[in-house]
Amino acid sequence: MSGRNTSDLQVLCSAGRLFLQPLWDRLRTWEALTQSPFFPAIFSITTYVGFCLPFVALDFLCPWVPALRRYKIHPNFWPTARQLLPCLGQTLYQHLVFVLPVTLFGWTRGRALLPSEAPELLQLVCHVVLCLLLFDAEFFLWHVLHHKVPWLYRTFHKRHHENSPSFALATQYMSVWELFSLGFFDMVNVMLLECHPLTVLVFHVFNIWLSVEDHSGYDFPWSTHRLVPFGWYGGVAHHDLHHSQFNCNFAPYFTHWDKLLGTLRSSQAK
Ligand SMILES: [Zn+2]
Ligand SMILES: [Zn+2]
């Protein structure tokens, strides 16, 4: 019986790999681009700005389309150009002056050859979920520490709280130390788990999307916290409360750490 279960699992795993293989084969034809020293910084900035732009467009339409405001956490707030441009400018500046040199240095230390086989679908999903859970725990600790120690808050984290209510382009409005801490947590887990390069790519895209959604100010019926059951995921409503109240909802995504520490607050409770 257990032999049959094992072979069933093997069939399922190889089906999952077959499912991803065409995508992985296509990505490998772009190896010259993905292995270029500029790729990590360009990928990071284009994915981030690409995810922000739809929300910028919605904020632009908000004054003329009242129906949009029912999805806004703060219905009468939309960022002005004087708020948007410094955020965008700082993100571009930090990527050019800090992120690019670090990724170039990493590139000079050599790059691993891309494997010819795609990862199994189940393994990819498990690794992405594990990476998100680990990232959530690491940033929770960092975040609590940078709120509880006044010097750390003033020196490193205060800048991220300058935009309240939050908006999509304010996601990466932060000090260089905070940006590198997030980048470190983003990278260290995929290295610890020895994730497949395709898994790393999927995790980065997910992580950037979830962080932008957290700050977007829009609570849609399809927002991630409405798709994950049992209130396990806090998302945009929870992070918005963190930006306005400072002393709650320190975890960026999930709710279990704040529940354990007694710092979880829900928008309904407000
Ligand atoms: Zn934030
Ligand atoms: Zn904070």
Image: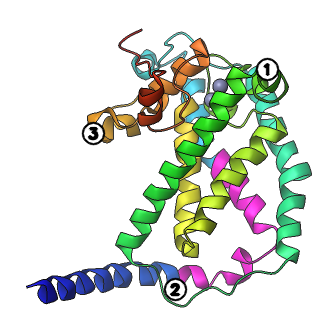
The crowding category of the residue bearing disc 2, from other C-alpha atoms within 10 Å (few below 14, some 14 to 19, many at least 20), is: few
- Image depth: mark 3 or mark 1 in front: 3
C-beta proximity under 8 Å, tags 3 and 1? no
Q: Is residue 40 magenta?
A: yes
Query: Residue 225's image quarter?
Result: top left
Q: Is residue 203 magenta?
A: no
Amino acid at circle 2? Asp
- Mark closest to the chain's N terminus, 3 or 1: 1
Res 58 visible: yes
Pick whichever, 210 or 53, lies toward us.
210
The residue to which callout 1 is attached is 82
User: Disc 2 beta carbon < 8 A from ligand 1?
Assistant: no
Amino acid at circle 1? Arg
The crowding category of the residue bearing disc 3, from other C-alpha atoms within 10 Å (few below 14, some 14 to 19, many at least 20), is: few
The residue to which callout 2 is attached is 25
At x 82%, y 63%, the residue is 103
Residue 264 on image: x %, y %: 45, 22
Determine whether the residue tagged by mark 2 lies in a helix, strand or loop.
Answer: helix
Q: Give left or right: position of 194 versus 181.
A: left
At x 26%, y 86%, the residue is 10
- Mark closest to the chain's N terminus, 1 or 2: 2
At x 59%, y 60%, the residue is 189
Pick whichever, 136 or 87, lies toward us.
136
In the image, residue 72 above or below residue 202: above
- Res 229 label: 3
Query: Residue 40's image quarter?
Result: bottom right
